[in-house]
Image (tube, rainbow, N blue to C red):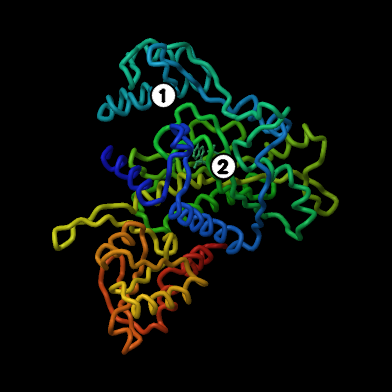
Amino acid sequence: MKNFFDFLVSYSKRYGFIFPSNEIYGGINAVYDYGQYGVELKNNIKKYWWESMTQVHENIIGMDSSILTDINVWKASGHLKKFNELLIDNKDSKKRYRPDILIENYVKKNFSKNLEKKNKILSRLYYSLNKKDFLDIKKLINQLQISDPDNGSKNWTNIHFFNMMFKIKYIENLFLRPETAQNIYCNFNNIKKSNRINIPFGVAQIGKSFRNEIVARQFLFRLREFEQMEMQFFISPKKEEENKWYNYWKKMRLKWHLELNLGKDKYKLYNHQNLAHYANLGVDIQFKFPFGFKELEGIHSRRDFDLKQHEVFSKKKLRIVENKNNYRPYVIETSLGLDRMFLSVLSSTLSKEKLENGNDRIILKLPFYLSPVKAAIFPLVNKNELSKLAKKIFNDLKIEYKVEYDSKSSIGKLYRRQDAIGTPLCFTVDYETINTNTVTVRYRDSMKQERIHIKKISKKIEEITSMKNILKNISSNID
Ligand code: GAP
């Protein structure tokens, strides 16, 4: 797995998916840039999420709010006081760790077969976390003789809290948001007044969030600057409605992931032991990343925690008015990290395959509608007549699809490159094209080839790469 992970990181850079940010100056820890194919894949994931939310659901609207946020928003939301992580430093290595993760990793490594011992240690950890008994957590680290994974030292500091929000240093009272949700709550009255929408309704948003993560490792998994795709669903404030919509969104979100066909066994639901300060119910959709099952998406019932807090702090009413009654709605939230989603897709579709002739090919078996490039067009040889014709086909297609024209290598090498970036279809113009107006189409996964008429190319791309069918499947599950 370590080998695969190293391969994934170097592949991502070599093929223009992910670059370390500011690399020429040494890079920034846990901040990455998306290269030419990375940004296309990311945009396609966004499109799948956005259209599943705002097009397929007639009662979900979109918005895009500011990243800079007033301190009062975070006072009200509780993030200023409660959005903290535990921190422990190793005095010798000068490295920082989350003590709960140190203990969890230690237990996983040493007691994976001794369930009784494993559960005993983890129960004590979670009990002490709940009670905020940091002395006991430190005691546990000492008793288990946990050492720094980096240099083996057991010379630990005491455990303390660390707020994860980024404050803007030179502008008073502004923070970079650590979640996109709050500006939807702050805009509640604007949204209500500008839309003829009734409860239940949702507001979806995709945007950057920032967290000063202590343990920012594992590539795109835990970043300091990342993107979230969040949806706040406003419902009637009743327990039955809360259960109904919480279960509905749990089911819908899992369905959305499963439609990608990355493997049913790659997903697990995990009910939270330690709920976030704003949540009444919480479940994670976990994904089998190369380093094990980890949280991909969170679904929470936030009830009216946030609207109530904003009412207190802003002194504005944030309510639904119905037949002379007014009430604060409950909220069910779905929150998916876009970069984590990107990592889940990339890591589970990338592989090396042995070919019949003994050579290897790198192949990215992306769902076709997510592929950065939908089709590539090549001339069999880079001769004027063939390349002119291939270029014309490319120019006609590029208005509708993200396609590539390439003539710089032999046809075998051109196929290999497109396989490696996940392109579903390659069309080759050869001498027969001149007489018959047909090209060969070559399929990524089977590598099979057939001839089709030039006029049918566009329809073929549409048939294979369109998102329509998958959106129809999502739509068929809406009550
Ligand atoms: N609004 C609720 C909220 O932010 P969260 O569980 O803290 O809940 C939601 O985050 C999702 O955002 C996570 O499931 C994960 O996919 C993503 N996420 C959170 N922190 C992240 C980080 N440091 N780097 C990358 N993605 C992150």
Lateral position of residue 279 relative to residue 401, left or right = right
Q: Of the numbered discs in the image, which one, if any, rests on residue 195?
A: none
Amino acid type of disc 2?
A: His
Q: Is mark 2 within 8 Å of ligand 1?
A: yes
| Horizontal and vertical percent position of residue 341 | 45, 48
Judging depth in this view, the residue of 476 and 194 nearest the camera is: 194
Q: Of the numbered discs in the image, which one, if any, rests on residue 123?
A: 1
Look at 34% across and 78% down and name the residue there.
386
Q: Is residue 51 above or below residue 401?
A: above
Question: For mark 2, does the 10 Å Cα neighbourhood hold few (<14), some (14 to 19), or many (20 or more) residues?
Answer: many
Judging depth in this view, the residue of 16 and 168 nearest the camera is: 16
Lateral position of residue 322 relative to residue 263, left or right = right
Q: Quadrant of residue 414?
A: bottom left
Look at 59% across and 49% down and name the residue there.
206
- Quadrant occupied by the C terminus: bottom right
Q: Is residue 328 above or below residue 156?
A: below
Check if mark 2's residue and mark 1's residue have beta carbons within 8 Å: no
Amino acid type of disc 1?
A: Ser
For label 1, the SS is helix
Judging depth in this view, the residue of 249 and 357 nearest the camera is: 357
Question: For mark 1, does the 10 Å Cα neighbourhood hold few (<14), some (14 to 19), or many (20 or more) residues?
Answer: few
Task: Report the Cα–Cα distance between label 2 and label 1.
Answer: 23 Å
Dot 2 or dot 1: first in sequence order is 1
| Residue at the outermost right position | 324
Of labels 2 and 1, the one closer to you: 2
Lateral position of residue 319 relative to residue 402, left or right = right
Q: Which residue is mark 2?
A: 300
